[in-house]
Amino acid sequence: MSIRESTLVRRARGLVMVGPAFAAAIAYVDPGNFATNFAAGADYGHRLLWVVVGANLMGMVVQFLSAKLGLATGANLAQLCRKRYPRPLVAGMWIQAELVAMATDLAEVIGGAVALSLLFDLPMAAGGLLVIAASFVILALDARGKRKFEAVVAGCLGVILLGFVWGLAAAGVRPGDLGSGLLPTVPDAQALLIAGGILGATVMPHVVYLHSDLASRHSREPRHPKDPARRAAPDRRPDPDRQRALVWQIRLDVVAALALAGLANVAMLVIAAQLFHGGPLPADTLESIHSGFGVLLGGGGALAFALALLASGLASASVGTYAGQVVMAGFIGRTLPITVRRLITVLPVLVVLLLGVDATQALLWSQLVLSFGIPFVLIPLVGFTRDTELMGPLVNGRATTVSAAVLAAVVVALNAVLAVTAVWS
């Protein structure tokens, strides 16, 4: 090992950049993913498994670019937009990001409320209020350090994964079916719509903003707070050598976190294919899926599903609120007290719950609103990470830029198709 290489290794010692991706990964297993994955497996068996795997790989690319942007610049995506774009455009981006935040809360709080209803027979409105309150508790951990917040969110991801791994073991797996599901096929137009829903909902706008922010903070905060030699000023980038040395940690963080989220999504689809495809039991709502688990796998299976859904709702609601703070501070340079902000974004959720709107339909419509935020995230992300002046030694290579641009175009196009289909159907 050369002197330079040994220096890089020494300066990057400690998993400084491991953790942010686990907070972002919870968005890949939020209640909306439950609905799309179970619909795919119940309606088409294993034939859309390749879509889930491909969506997860796309997510890895996007989240890697987001974290690398935060590491290279010491700023998050929203802050960079405010610095580099005209003020009217920034104002428009902020408004749409706030609407996306409301749609995010709608999906996540409703998912948690459904879980509490399944577990304790609570009214949906009461369950929603409990989820909101619990998300404040999780967010309070952030005041004690980013690591504690990220650890709790990662723990929720573990609960989701364990729940579905247990269900997978109980339902049984046929390796041959898994192999055939990895061959790209689209049986019919409805399958195309479901595939678009899986892919289109892969990139959640709020966690791209959040991941860049967490990465920028980790990059300039010391692993050990009492170590002044590793403390950087808030407005200073890490030095280039340390940046290069930390990129491998970002890769490790993103691959590990998104692989676990991807495994949970694969398990959802496979379980749905094993239990519901071609069978008499419906799987068109979260409640009917829970009921089917109880019939086919017993009380343990139903409990595992409900607990996984609850962990998803609680963690994703907390992450969504955190991301909302990042978006507001980044785009307009101001913040509201977390309680005030939370009350504003959850008002639509409370209205939906009090009106008794069908939870699954509300989830689907929330995903439609989220789709409109995709271009406002992916286009700047690709543009910034290819800017040599901005990124320095971490600028994208040509192949990375081309690949990211193609992925961005695919996701934006699929979301446009979903939006048109939803409006005209």
Image (spheres, helix red, strand yellow):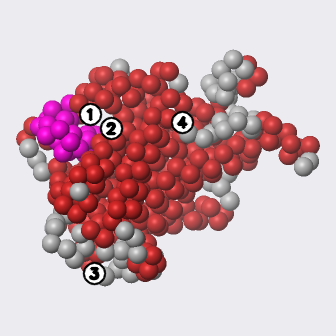
> As rendered, which of 320 and 101 lies closer to the eye?
320
Q: Name the residue at 85% across, 46% down.
A: 5
Mark 4 neighbour density, 10 Å: few (under 14) some (14–19) many (20 or more) = many
Q: From this viewpoint, is residue 343 visible?
A: yes
- Asked whether the residues under the numbered discs 1 and 2 touch, taking CB atoms below 8 Å apart as contact, a structural biologist would say yes
| Separation (CA) of disc 3 from disc 1 | 38 Å
Above-or-below relation of 56 to 381 = below
- Asked whether the residues under the numbered discs 2 and 3 touch, taking CB atoms below 8 Å apart as contact, a structural biologist would say no
Q: Nearer the viewer, mark 2 or mark 3?
A: 2
Principal secondary structure, stretch drawn in magenta: helix
SS at circle 4: helix
Q: Name the residue at 37% across, 62% down.
A: 168
Q: Earlier in the sequence, mark 3 or mark 1?
A: 1
SS at circle 3: loop
**Residue tagged 3:** 188
Q: Which mark is residue 214?
A: 4
Q: Which quadrant of the structure image shows residue 136?
A: top left
**Residue tagged 2:** 314
Q: Which quadrant of the structure image shows residue 98?
A: top left
Judge whether residue 126 is colored magenta. Answer: yes
| Separation (CA) of disc 1 from disc 2 | 6 Å
- Asked whether the residues under the numbered discs 4 and 1 touch, taking CB atoms below 8 Å apart as contact, a structural biologist would say no
Provide the residue span drawn in magenta: 100-129
